[in-house]
């Protein structure tokens, strides 16, 4: 899943980005309100973590303009403003959650996953496709009764496929979501990673789930 962090404090932003990436998220960063709003409107992220006190326009204005544009993009306010009126204002403007600084990082992760589950209509931390199961909390993968050991990147790649089942994903899209880089046509990192993932979740089994769509990319179906 791809997150947009809108935070003007460089030290806090670096710390949050590192922690979120270690949890398996792809993270974009904007350090002012105008840039954050542009990134949020342009699409491509699954959730926004939004500070209130920002250069340019503040977090209240960013959230208000998002909702005015009929965007249902999940937003978690992350701010030092802990007054009840501020909490009420954030939730009334359409924030999905409100987290006050200082905060426990584990709680933030739990709230992010809870908001994403609610928005996706998922009541559990488990993705299922055919006989393939991915437990996002325990980081465990099973195909039928067989447990499969994946690296963190392979886990992220599989999660991307499972959240977009039956959709053809281009190499560019995969590279941006899993590696946070612009795809280089001369690079084979995506192809090699998909090949390795197939070797673990497809090769030992009769039915193959990940397929190549020539000239377009890959699809889980």
Image (cartoon, rainbow, N blue to C red):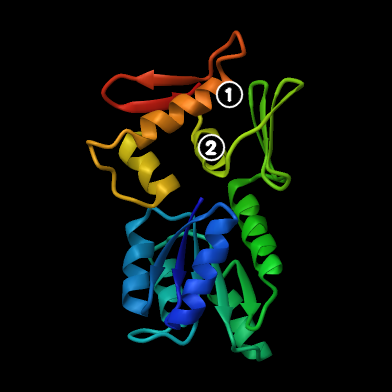
Among the 4 quarters of the image, the one containing residue 128: top right
When the figure is inspected, residue 191 is found, relative to residue 213, above or below; the finding is below
Q: Residue furthest top?
A: 206
Q: Residue at x 57, y 64 (%)?
A: 19
When the figure is inspected, residue 16 is found, relative to residue 87, above or below; the finding is above
Sequence-wise first label, 2 or 1 = 2
Instruction: Name the foreground residue: 193 vs 96.
Output: 193
Q: Are marks 2 and 1 in contact (CB under 8 Å)?
A: yes
Residue on which disc 1 sits:
200
Residue 104 in the image, given as x and y percentages of width and height: 70, 74
Residue on which disc 2 sits:
154
Within-10-Å neighbours for mark 2: few <14, some 14–19, many 20+: some
User: Which element is circle 1 on?
Assistant: helix
User: Which element is circle 2 on?
Assistant: helix
Numbered badge on residue 35? none
Q: Residue at x 64, y 76 (%)?
A: 99
Q: Residue at x 58, y 23 (%)?
A: 200
**Drawn side of residue 101 relative to residue 165, left or right:** right
When the figure is inspected, residue 191 is found, relative to residue 57, above or below; the finding is above
When the figure is inspected, residue 82 is found, relative to residue 174, above or below; the finding is below
Instruction: Name the foreground residue: 19 vs 37.
Output: 19
Among the 4 quarters of the image, the one containing residue 114: bottom right
Q: Is residue 59 visible?
A: no
Residue 30 in the image, given as x and y percentages of width and height: 37, 72
Instruction: Name the foreground residue: 101 vs 138.
Output: 138
Q: Residue furthest right?
A: 145
Residue 196 in the image, given as x and y percentages of width and height: 49, 27
Q: Is residue 39 visible?
A: yes
Q: Residue at x 67, y 63 (%)?
A: 111
Marks 2 and 1, how far apart in space?
10 Å
């Amino acid at each position: 899943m791809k997150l947009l962090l809108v935070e003007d404090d460089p030290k806090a932003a670096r710390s949050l980005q590192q922690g979120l990436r270690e949890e398996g998220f792809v993270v974009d960063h904007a350090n002012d309100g105008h840039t954050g709003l542009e990134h949020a409107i342009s699409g491509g992220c699954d959730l926004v973590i939004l500070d209130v006190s920002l250069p340019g326009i503040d977090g209240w204005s960013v959230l208000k303009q998002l909702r005015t544009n009929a965007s249902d993009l999940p937003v978690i306010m992350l701010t030092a403003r802990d007054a009840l009126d501020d909490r009420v204002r954030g939730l009334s403007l359409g924030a999905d959650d409100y987290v006050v600084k200082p905060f426990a990082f584990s709680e933030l992760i739990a709230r992010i996953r809870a908001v994403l589950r609610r928005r996706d209509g998922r009541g559990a931390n488990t993705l299922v496709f055919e006989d393939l199961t991915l437990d996002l909390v325990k980081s465990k993968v099973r195909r039928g009764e067989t447990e499969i050991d994946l690296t963190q990147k392979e886990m992220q790649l599989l999660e991307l496929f499972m959240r977009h089942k039956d959709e053809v994903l281009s190499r560019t899209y995969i590279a941006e979501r899993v590696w946070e880089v612009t795809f280089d046509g001369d690079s084979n990192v995506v192809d090699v990673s998909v090949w390795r993932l197939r070797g673990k979740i497809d090769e030992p089994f009769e039915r193959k789930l990940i397929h190549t769509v020539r000239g377009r990319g890959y699809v889980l179906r």
